[in-house]
Image (cartoon, rainbow, N blue to C red):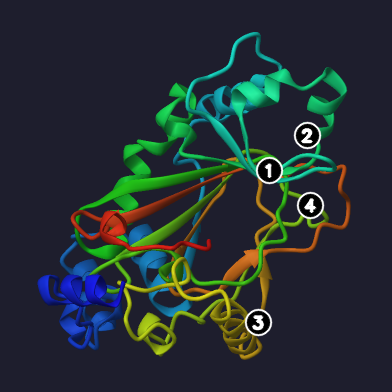
Amino acid sequence: MILKIADILKNLPWSFNSTAELPWLERSQAEKSLQKARQQRRISEREYQLLDHWRELGYCIVKDLIPATAIDNLVAELADLFFLESAIPGLRIEGIQAENLPASLSHEQVLALDMEQRKALVNSIWRLHAFHEISPAARAIFDNQNLRALVNLIIGKSCEPRYSINFLHGTEQGLHEDMAVFYVHPANHLVGVWIALEDISADAGPLIFYPKSHKNIKVTDFFPDYPAVNLKNITAEQIPQYQDYVNQRAQNYDCQSFTAKKGEILLWHGMLIHGGGKINNTLLTRKSMVIHFIAEGGDYNDRALGPFNW
């Protein structure tokens, strides 16, 4: 494996030393560049406020980008998913935390369960990856052009939606940075997007995040061979070390919860620390869709070498 990684490093421009490679809002003249764009009316006052908030805090919150009908269509599809008469080829339910069930099941296996087991599964923690490849309703949100235009503004170049995850419940996922779980070059050309598909209660395990934690930090501080090596393919022994590293960093910042209203969207920087909040009421849902945008040509996932542990 060492030889293979060495070959990749020889053939790809992995160096992140130049600040010119960073998105425009992270360069030394970012504040002046942003003010100039406003003065020249290349961006609106609203866009200026959003971008300046992103520059300083590492996130922004918007609403009304996605039609309510698009959200309703997706929620309806998800509600029926475990009770269809025929299985959807290629669909898998991942991250299952339900008694007497494995962590991953195909849709066919889910529909083979008895009705009580399926109801129990619906009310447990699970997730769907890449549902947009199967569901027209998820695809409509995934391809939303208003959302894509905002991401393009944030990064300063054309970006594309690459990955999606759908959730029905909170996950209590540990703190992490998204750059650590994707293979992205140049640095930080990654935007996470969390879309509330319903009003989110503080007791449902909302997304939590740490404003300003994106500053003065590089993914290579913990992963020196990034993007060839990240959290997905480090050794199992190194995973707790990463978790301790992020948890310690998080102590330097205030924690915020995204108790969103339906249709509200949180966009966050690839190095912003975030995770899943504590679930205080397991009867509550946390219907949401996550999309990760990467600058065009910047996703090196297909070059990554296993074994993978994430």
Q: Secondary structure at mark 1?
A: strand
Q: How far apart are labels 4 and 2 at the CA level?
A: 17 Å
Q: Position of residue 123 (x, y in %)?
A: 81, 36
Along the line of sight, the residue nearer the viewer: 140 or 65: 140
Label 2: element kind? helix
Name the residue rendered at 69%, 19% in the picture: 111
- In the displayed structure, does residue 272 sit left or right of residue 283? left
Which x, y percent locates residue 286?
A: 71, 45
Q: Which one is earlier in the sequence, the residue at label 4 or at label 2?
A: 2
Per the image, the residue denoted by label 4 is 204
Q: Which residue is mark 2?
A: 121
Q: CA distance from mark 1 to mark 2?
A: 8 Å
User: Crowding near pointer 3: few (<14 within 10 Å), some, many (20+)?
Assistant: few
Q: Quadrant of the N terminus?
A: bottom left
Residue type at tag 1:
Trp
The residue depicted at 65 percent of the width and 8 percent of the height is 85
Q: Are marks 1 and 2 in contact (CB under 8 Å)?
A: yes
Q: Which residue is mark 3?
A: 254
